[in-house]
Image (cartoon, grey):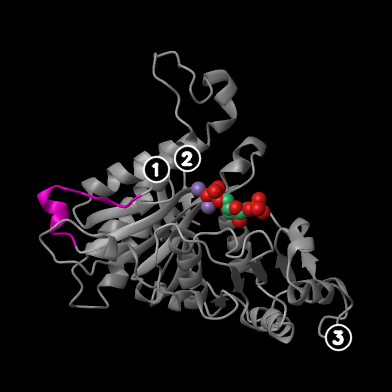
Amino acid sequence: MSQSKLITMDEFTIQETRKFPQATGDLSAILRDLGLAGKVINNQVRRAGLVDILGKHGATNVQGEEQMKLDIFANDTLINILQNCTECAGIGSEENDDHISYQDTFSANSKYVVLFDPLDGSSNIDVNAPIGTIFAIYRRVSELGKPCTEADFLQAGKNLMAAGYIIYGSSTMMVYATRLGVNGFTLEPSIGEFCLSHPNMKCAENGKIYSLNQGNSIKYSDGMQAYLNYCMEHNKEEGRPLTQRYIGSMVADMHRTLIKGGIFMYPADKSNPNGKLRLQYECNPMAFIVEAAGGKATNGHENILDIVPTELHQRVPIYIGSKNMVNKVMEYVKEHATTPM
Ligand code: AHG
Ligand code: MN
Ligand code: MN
């Protein structure tokens, strides 16, 4: 493609904003700054394999600076860039026990808050597998002119204004969703810009791939175990078993699910009644993206986006992806609903 045909993410976001004459552009500014943070984090991620040469976490590098763990580097990058962005009043992060309300005057007058998982799938860094950053943007509910409050971070996912992720994979991509739809942008390294590469992404109604940590299956409910048997058998819809794929990085597993169709699950099990993944910065943003792309996300009882959070770091079971596949697993779970969990 000639470079003149490239549409950068910022150009695209501005064009989308123009569809709404009343829009102020504040949300576009946050998306742009999240893209900037993504590029800064990407730069460090791309050097991760040199960590033994440049120095491990806790070690001192040649300049006498202490090396930072990548998830802490990613977290600090997002916190600082979003504070400089005059549209963000505060953040909630996997890496911080409590939310942070930015205390400067600009931030107190900002309309939005952002929740994020700065580096998702970080155990995959050592094996050079894809990792990512996940984000969720809400309009604040607390009074403008004052620092934001906890209530801003405990909103149900259905209030989301936008959500997305950056995947540091074989290429680096930023995917974000608004109520208008889902679009994907690939980083073009020669110009340092995310460029529209996956317009109007849709999650197919059906898929052939199921994705979960099947090693936990002995601890799953009877319904889940029956569903896994269905996946592994020659079932009548498919005429052959489904394919199992699990990277262990939610961003990477969800990116595949969005592009190829399929289902991703992190169910409850006997030792973890709420599953593992966090509602506010893992499940809600992914549920918002998947629903905007025509898919579905549930915790087994209600849509993920309807859950009203009570704590910043609460966990929730999740079944997410192609609508018909999510409905199918729910049939099995409900049929065996007498089993606790
Ligand atoms: P994080 O690296 O942010 O802590 O998240 C890891 C998560 C998620 O990315 C992945 O889907 C899941 O943990 C994998 O868990 P298991 O190793 O239990 O399968
Ligand atoms: Mn994570
Ligand atoms: Mn993380």
- First in sequence: mark 1 vs mark 3: 1
In this view of the protein, can residue 174 be seen by the observer?
Answer: no
Q: Which residue is mark 1?
A: 75
Residue count near mark 2 (Cα–Cα under 10 Å), binned few <14, some 14–19, many ≥20: many
Please name whichever residue, 270 or 117, is drawn nearer the observer in this view of the structure.
270
Which SS class for mark 3? loop
Q: Splitting the image into 4 quarters, where does residue 80 fall? A: top left
**Label 3–label 2 contact, CB within 8 A:** no
Q: Is residue 133 above or below residue 48?
A: below
Question: What number is the disc on residue 71?
Answer: 2
| Disc number lying in front (3 or 2) | 2
Question: What number is the disc on residue 241?
Answer: none
Residue count near mark 1 (Cα–Cα under 10 Å), binned few <14, some 14–19, many ≥20: many
Question: Is 44 a magenta residue?
Answer: no
Determine the CA span between mark 1 and mark 3: 47 Å
Q: Which residue is mark 3?
A: 236
* Residue at 47% over, 57% down: 165
| x and y percentages locating residue 212 in the rendered image | 70, 62
Give the left or right position of residue 232, taking residue 132 as reference.
right
Magenta span of residues: 98-110
- First in sequence: mark 3 vs mark 2: 2
| x and y percentages locating residue 172 in the rendered image | 51, 49
